[in-house]
Amino acid sequence: MTFRPRLLALALLLSPLPLLAADAPAKYRSAQEIIDAAPDGDWHTPAAENLLYMELDGGRVIIELAPQFAPEHAGNIRTLAREGFWDGTSVYRSQDNFVVQFGDADADEAGKAKPLGSAKTHLPAEFQRAAAGLDFTALPDRDGWAAKTGFVGDFAVAGDGEHAWLAHCYGTVGAGRNNADDSSIGAELYVVTGQSPRQLDRNITVVGRVLEGMELLSTIKRGPPPMGFYDDAAQRTPIRAIHLASELPAGERVPLQVLRTDSKSFADAVEARRNRVDGFYKRAAGHIDLCNIPLPVRVLPN
Amino acid sequence: MTFRPRLLALALLLSPLPLLAADAPAKYRSAQEIIDAAPDGDWHTPAAENLLYMELDGGRVIIELAPQFAPEHAGNIRTLAREGFWDGTSVYRSQDNFVVQFGDADADEAGKAKPLGSAKTHLPAEFQRAAAGLDFTALPDRDGWAAKTGFVGDFAVAGDGEHAWLAHCYGTVGAGRNNADDSSIGAELYVVTGQSPRQLDRNITVVGRVLEGMELLSTIKRGPPPMGFYDDAAQRTPIRAIHLASELPAGERVPLQVLRTDSKSFADAVEARRNRVDGFYKRAAGHIDLCNIPLPVRVLPN
């Protein structure tokens, strides 16, 4: 837990000679400066078959699926997207400081529910998986909810050594379910828009995360408390379509890249956030929570 | 860290006789059930001189000031409200997953800045205070950002034993400043609308929290990245007025009450959230973070 200005002052005090440039502690760089300077090799392009383009009247939301954690749900969601299941559906719930939820608002009404096409109508719960076999980049700080936290690919992950699971952070996408563990099929999805509801971890199948366009979901007018389901269907936010990027011609795909969470640039950016010593911050936290770390995303020029 | 269904199963297994009602573990009650059943004595009415009514076109936001932590800022904010400083100003910044900020959008422009009336133009920084003398109700779980967390009155508080400070949670209201510690006077205020930015704790003067109407602030259209200040003044959200409740006739005040954070009902509701064993949750977290605890607020019938 370093607090660099003090270390710098100490170094100056102890130095018998004027510091040479080569001896000077590295100048503090902000997370943004580190990200802006990251070499191209520290960025990666997510697989097109894992990217959903959600088209709203206000713009596009891009969601990345996490088949390493929820392979059955990811497969079913791909089927639903290919067959246009969500085209013409809506965001039918917005609960302040919690989630928006979307899909078929009439899913629970016999006779009115939208046909699921060739999607599976039953899936196993995918709340967690074996920790073995994952390329896990651990964070240095303790977390109250889990023994370990860090990243696997583009995803915030928690674990206990034996199992690992996707954590509920801002922008996390999960599969709504009824009371039974295995009552989700990925047709009704929610996105976290509030303070990280980590109590949901390992209680529900997380299927991915939003990479772009969160501000379109987070500002959706809230429905009535406590749950935020709209009483009036006219208040729902229409979904024009949700398509898989891999189903679109290459020229219509967004040239989006994500900073690799196992790169030095990412580690340096996390450290710069843990210990901020720019002109504004007076006291470095020496800590960061898993859900306080934004995932850097960039769109390359076409 | 109890997990009640297992304890219940164990009790049934070990019991040589059928359990009598008096021996049965208490039935799980949700936080909402506990709050709904809280006796009137567990609720309190915040002092009218600490309540700000912020009037937006979409409705009213109610902010409670925290003079125990920021007496100088609270005093200046009362002066500004009494003299109508914010009437006709705006929410001029909305940064996704961070804050909205409001006040005089031209505050930094010489010649255009709105006069501050009899408000003070310089205040000391009030980032923290002595822990002694506070009625602190501690939470049971560990926190990565601070040695202690809990509540003082209606406010989420962190501390190190010697000092205590208001924590940056969803709905926290702070005083915007420039780089100097003591450059805030309470005229430009921000409200946290995203994941708790605890790195700001002890770096800025927190002045209070939103009690009602967060959904009006959290859904304000985001301004352009990275900071969310609008380029176009027309995108700002107008503030009709901000008044102190104590300046209004008693009949025009909202009969608002807050569950006492030192009450048994509040402690029971926190425990019900730490260990959820309703039909939906399959695995109790056995933990809760400071900023995951909502403050129960009710409005009495007139």
Image (spheres, coloured by chain):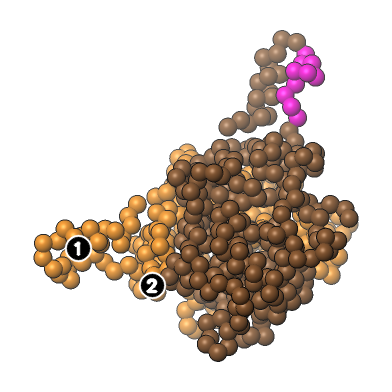
Chain colours: A brown, B orange
Query: CB of mark 1 within 8 Å of CB of mark 2?
Result: no
| Left or right relative to B25: residue A274 | right
**Which residues, given as a range, are shown in magenta?**
A18-27
Whole-percent x, y for residue A289 in the image: 57, 46
Whole-percent x, y for residue B264 in the image: 34, 62
Question: In the rendered image, which quarter is residue B87 located in?
Answer: bottom right
Mark whose residue sits in front, 1 or 2: 1
Instruction: Say which chain tag 1 marks.
Output: B
Q: Label 2: few (<14), some or many (≥20) within 10 Å?
A: few
Question: In the rendered image, which quarter is residue A52 located in?
Answer: bottom right
Q: Which mark is residue B33?
A: 2
Labels 1 and 2: the sequence-earlier one: 1
The secondary element bearing badge 2 is classed as: helix
Q: Nearer the viewer, residue B74 or A30?
A: A30
Residue B175 vs A138, above or below: the answer is below
What's the magenta bit mostly, secondary-structure-wise? loop
The type of residue carrying mark 1 is Leu
- Number of marks in picture: 2
Residue at the image point whose x is 51% and y is 67% from the top: A123
Q: Quick one: quadrant of the N terminus of chain A? A: top right
Q: Which mark is residue B12?
A: 1
Give the farthest residue toward the bottom: A111
Q: Label 1: few (<14), some or many (≥20) within 10 Å?
A: some
What is the distance, in whole Å, between disc 1 and disc 2 at their CAs?
A: 26 Å
Q: Is residue A285 magenta?
A: no
Residue at the image point whose x is 46% and y is 61% from the top: A203
Residue at the image point whose x is 65% and y is 25% from the top: A7
The type of residue carrying mark 2 is Glu
